Image (tube, grey):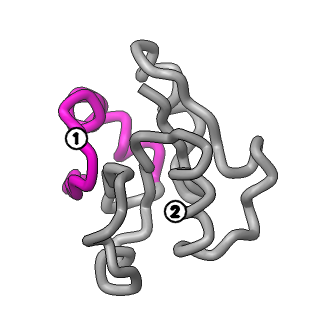
Amino acid sequence: MKVLFDQGTPVPLRGHISAHHVSTAYELGWATLKNGELLAAAENSGFEVLVTTDTNLQYQQNLNQRKIAIVVLSTTSWPRIQKKIKAIVSAIDLATPNSYQSVAIN
């Protein structure tokens, strides 16, 4: 599966998602794209999952017509994210087109 990390998603997470092809918005030159533009660019480039830390995305964008699955992490803190790696990987593995899943990280 092609997975895209947005700007707030810690890059070290990539090492734990070895079953998928992971790219970052920064690597693709998409760091300055706004949410709607980023979603469109990701879908047009064949990405199947967007991993983001933007907890307001579902309120800012109409996600009903999107093909891309969205996995939202509730923090950008890598030390906290490390404690939930298994749940994050599971959310990515189980993502289906147009799904939205939030991973609560305390």
Q: Which residue is mark 1?
A: 96
Q: Residues within 10 Å of mark 2 (few under 14, many from 20)?
A: many
Q: Residues within 10 Å of mark 1 (few under 14, many from 20)?
A: some
Residue contact at pointers 1 and 2, CB within 8 angstroms: no
Provide residue 1's location: percent of width, then percent of height. Answer: 41, 26
Report the residue that reaches farthest toward the right: 29
Q: Magenta part of the protein: which range?
A: 77-106
**Residue drawn at (22%, 51%) of the image:** 103
**Residue drawn at (18%, 32%) of the image:** 94
Above or below — where is 23 with respect to 56? above
Residue 79 lies within the magenta run = yes
**Residue drawn at (76%, 45%) of the image:** 28
Provide residue 71's location: percent of width, then percent of height. Answer: 31, 51
Taking the image as drawn, is residue 80 in sight?
Answer: yes
Q: CA distance from mark 1 to mark 2?
A: 15 Å
Would residue 6 appear left or right of 18 to someone viewing this image? right
Would residue 74 appear left or right of 54 to someone viewing this image? left
Report the residue that reaches farthest toward the bottom: 60
**Residue drawn at (40%, 43%) of the image:** 49
Depth order, front residue of 17/94: 94
Residue 39 lies within the magenta run = no
Q: Which residue is mark 2?
A: 39
Provide residue 44's location: percent of width, then percent of height. Answer: 58, 51
Where residue 25 is drawn, which disc sits there?
Answer: none
> In the rendered image, which quarter contains the C terminus?
bottom left
Local secondary structure at mark 1: loop
